[in-house]
Image (cartoon, helix red, strand yellow):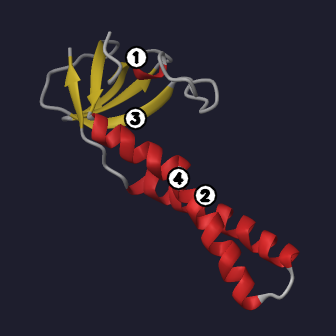
Amino acid sequence: MEDNQEYGVVRARSGNSYTLELGNEGGCHGCLLAGVCNHQNKTVEVQSELDLSLGQKVALEVKPSDRILSSFVIFVVPIVLMIIFYFLGGLFLDFESGQIIFSFVGLAFGGLLIWLIDKRAKIEVEIRK
């Protein structure tokens, strides 16, 4: 089993669009944060020219560069925004507790940004039977 593969089961089909239910195996199996991200049975929509049947188990391969970019967005961007908002708070406020509150606003903004990216991002996956 390769680390850059996820395994899923075809749950729905509409033309060339498939709904896959991902389990806790594949790339998550070797991840140190598998218990943190709550990845139990997540569903994803994918496009494929393959003729897949309902209930069929398939392998999804995600490019390592997409995994690295996703990790960067999830773990680094909120911290960077938190630091930036801390210093922005220093421009508008003269007390440190206000800067700290401003930094938490930056952290919340980072969470919102991650949510928006997650809704709009199109990560290319390769499906194998």
Asked if labels 4 and 2 touch by Cβ distance under 8 angstroms, the answer is yes
Tag in front: 1 or 3 = 1
Answer with mark 3 or mark 4, whichever residue precedes in sequence: 3
Answer with mark 1 or mark 4, whichever residue precedes in sequence: 1
Mark 3 residue element:
strand
Which quarter of the figure is the N terminus placed in? Answer: top left
User: Viewed as shown, does residue 61 lie left or right of 121?
Assistant: left
Q: Residue 44 carries which label?
A: 3
Tag in front: 2 or 1 = 2
Q: Is the residue marked by circle 2 packed among few (<14), some (14-19), or many (20+) residues within 10 Å?
A: some
Tag in front: 2 or 3 = 2
Answer with mark 1 or mark 3, whichever residue precedes in sequence: 1
Answer with mark 2 or mark 1, whichever residue precedes in sequence: 1
Tag in front: 3 or 4 = 4
Q: What residue type is labelled 2?
A: Ile
Asked if labels 4 and 1 touch by Cβ distance under 8 angstroms, the answer is no
The residue at which mark 2 appears reads as 79
Residue appearing at x 47%, y 22% in the figure: 28
The answer to which image quadrant residue 86 occupies is bottom right
Q: How far apart are marks 1 and 3 (CA)?
A: 15 Å
Q: Is the residue marked by circle 3 packed among few (<14), some (14-19), or many (20+) residues within 10 Å?
A: few
Q: In this orientation, which residue lies closer to the viewer: 42 or 38?
A: 38
Q: Can you name the residue that lies furthest to the top here?
A: 1
Q: Residue 76 carries which label?
A: 4
Q: In this view, does 124 lie above or below 89?
A: above
Q: Distance between the residues labelled 2 and 4?
A: 5 Å
Q: Distance between the residues labelled 2 and 3?
A: 28 Å
The count of marks equals 4
Q: Residue 5 carries which label?
A: none
Q: Which mark is residue 26?
A: 1
Which quarter of the figure is the C terminus placed in? Answer: top left
Q: What residue type is labelled 1?
A: Gly
